[in-house]
């Protein structure tokens, strides 16, 4: 299933980026070739090189497109929920649903060794989507519903459990479907920081 659907991207770019997402996770960046992308995407070699400089440009464009799509989805969630608890719960649910529906997105964003093939990329945890997650926790601290503490500690206590369950699900280690853990993990995580 395609994840990248940004209307500002051409159909060729969308096809190549969605194929790159799949192949970079399944085969790894270095083992994926342009001919692999041609075969998987159905886009000609010439069209790929017309749209991208090289494979690294594809990887960088992929990361940018993923982060922009994630930001759009987070913005929609934040607009629908106002309290820090509601935002935390909704963002946790969204993280889990995304991992379930689009496991390659989660694997690429969270687990690919980006620095190996995109050396200039800032750490993923400094990107806007991760800043947004921390901002919901800062909101809770500001509201007085989360105990005053270092923001990184509070964010690790809250989203860390959610992200670990997602990883266990991707590794097929959970006994139940991932979404069946949503209420339990969010409540336990929130209790760990609540005032």
Image (tube, grey):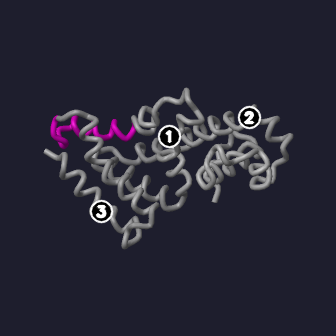
Residue range in magenta is 132-148
Image position of 163 (left or right of 158): right
> Residue 17 in the image: x percent, y percent?
68, 45
Tell me which residue sits at (29%, 41%) in the image: 155
Image quarter where the C terminus lies is top left
> Residue 81 in the image: x percent, y percent?
36, 47
Number of the front mark, 2 or 3: 2
Image quarter where the N terminus lies is bottom right
Q: Which mark is residue 183?
A: 3
Q: Is residue 146 magenta?
A: yes
At numbered mark 2, what does the secondary structure look like: helix, strand or loop? loop
Q: Residue furthest top?
A: 120
From where the camera sits, is residue 73 visible?
no
Choose top left, top right, bottom left or bottom right for residue 132: top left
Number of the front mark, 1 or 2: 2
Q: Residues within 10 Å of mark 3 (few under 14, many from 20)?
A: few
Q: Which residue is mark 1?
A: 71
Q: CB under 8 Å between callouts 3 and 1?
A: no
Q: Main SS of the magenta segment?
A: helix
Mark 3 to mark 1: distance in Å? 24 Å
From where the camera sits, is residue 36 visible?
yes
Q: Which residue is mark 2?
A: 54
Image position of 189 (left or right of 53): left
Mark 1 to mark 2: distance in Å? 26 Å
> Residue 103 in the image: x percent, y percent?
53, 57
Image: 130 above or below 15: above
Image: 177 above or below 39: below
């Amino acid at each position: 299933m395609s994840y990248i659907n940004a209307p500002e991207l051409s159909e060729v770019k969308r096809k190549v980026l969605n194929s790159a997402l799949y192949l970079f996770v399944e085969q790894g960046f270095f083992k994926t070739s342009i001919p692999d992308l041609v075969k998987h995407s159905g886009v000609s070699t010439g069209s790929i090189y017309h749209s991208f400089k090289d494979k690294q440009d594809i990887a960088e464009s992929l990361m940018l497109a993923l982060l922009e799509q994630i930001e759009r989805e987070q913005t929609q969630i934040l607009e629908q929920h106002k309290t820090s608890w509601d935002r935390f719960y909704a963002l946790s649910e969204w993280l889990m649903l995304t991992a379930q529906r689009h496991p390659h997105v989660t694997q690429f964003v969270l687990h690919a060794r980006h620095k190996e093939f995109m050396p200039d990329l800032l750490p993923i945890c400094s990107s806007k989507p991760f800043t947004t997650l921390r901002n919901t926790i800062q909101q809770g601290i500001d509201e007085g519903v989360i105990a005053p503490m270092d923001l990184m500690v509070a964010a690790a206590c809250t989203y860390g459990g959610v992200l670990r369950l997602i990883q266990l699900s991707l590794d097929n280690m959970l006994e139940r479907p991932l979404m069946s853990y949503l209420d339990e993990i969010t409540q336990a995580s929130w209790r760990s920081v609540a005032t």
